Image (cartoon, helix red, strand yellow):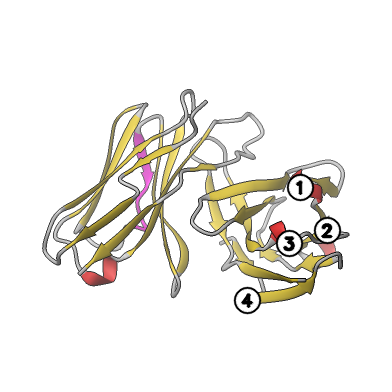
């Protein structure tokens, strides 16, 4: 069965510093991979997704993620963090077509310090 | 598009009462999902529908929980009777059925349920 692990419960970075959030997945076939962001009091919003092709995926708000099959990873990166990036980030893996089922990781909460 | 609409945004009720949460998905989306989010358990998929048909309800915690989707534009999640441990934020999400299967889910703002 597919699963997602986000090893970091929370991370603190300084504004302007680079960011990398880790995600490892378990899935037997080529996975569909997602990163979502949740700001306080709001629902989740898609940042980016991967399902085939170029393993480096660009998303919204300056985020990118790299799919590494050999490491079963899909880490999220941003070169320079802004205070508004403080939120919770969820990695997810999906499978199937039609009635699509997505498994979410536990989330990583990002704190940004001035 | 207005996005996924959920009502109410906040619900406070007493133990034993019936609670009904409502969701209007994005027009044209074929799949609808109900999630529950708590600090302890994170984001849990409760049930999802495809073309108004329940596909997987294995995440529904107990028989006290039920969900319906009578048409493509409306779904309800009902808890009867409610218990304090049901307190959580409940999200509804919808997605189109893209040919690739890599469906983005669009989340509503959630309903914060407090059972006293």
Residue assigned mark 3? A83
Q: Which residue is mark 1?
A: A61
Q: Which residue is tagged 4?
A: A9
Same chain, marks 3 and 4?
yes
Observer-nearest of A25 and B5:
B5
Spot occupied by residue A38 in the image (x, y as percentages of width and height) = 58, 56
Q: Secondary structure at mark 3?
A: helix
Question: Which of label 1 and label 3 is nearer to you?
Answer: 3
| Residue furthest top as drawn | B28
- Picture coordinates of residue A73 (x, y %)? 77, 64
| Residues at marks 3 and 4, CA–CA distance in whole angstroms | 19 Å
The one nearer the camera, B68 or B110, is: B110
Q: Please report the residue visible at 83 percent of the width from the left and 58 percent of the height from the top.
A: A78
Q: CA distance from mark 1 to mark 4?
A: 22 Å
- Callout 2 crowding tier (Cα within 10 Å): few <14, some 14–19, many ≥20: some
Q: Name the residue carrying label 2.
A: A78
Specify whether residue B51 is painted magenta: no
Indicate the quadrant where residue A10 lies. Answer: bottom right
Mark 3: give few (<14), some (14-19) or many (20+) Cα within 10 Å: some
Q: Considering only order in the chain, which callout, 4 or 1, is on the residue closer to the N terminus?
A: 4
Say if mark 4 contacts mark 2, CB within 8 Å. Answer: no
């Amino acid at each position: 069965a597919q699963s997602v692990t986000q090893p970091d419960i929370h991370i603190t970075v300084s504004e302007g510093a680079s960011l990398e959030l880790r995600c490892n997945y378990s899935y037997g076939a080529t996975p569909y991979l997602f990163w979502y962001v949740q700001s306080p009091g709001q629902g989740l919003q898609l940042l980016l997704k991967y399902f085939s092709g170029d393993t480096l995926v660009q998303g919204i708000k300056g985020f990118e993620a790299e799919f590494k099959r050999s490491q079963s990873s899909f880490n999220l990166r941003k070169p320079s963090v802004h205070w508004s990036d403080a939120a919770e980030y969820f990695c997810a893996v999906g499978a199937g077509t039609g009635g699509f089922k997505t498994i979410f990781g536990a989330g990583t909460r990002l704190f940004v310090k001035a | 598009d207005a996005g996924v609409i959920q009502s109410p945004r906040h619900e406070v009720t007493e133990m034993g009462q019936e609670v009904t949460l409502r969701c209007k998905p994005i027009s044209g989306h074929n799949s609808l999902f109900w999630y529950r989010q708590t600090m302890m358990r994170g984001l849990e998929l409760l049930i999802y529908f495809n073309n108004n048909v329940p596909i997987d309800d294995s995440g529904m915690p107990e028989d006290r929980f039920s969900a319906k989707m009578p048409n493509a534009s409306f779904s309800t999640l009902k808890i009867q009777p409610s218990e304090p441990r049901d307190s959580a934020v409940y999200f509804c999400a919808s997605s189109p059925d893209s040919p690739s299967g890599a469906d983005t889910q669009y989340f509503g703002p959630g309903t914060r349920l407090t059972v006293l």
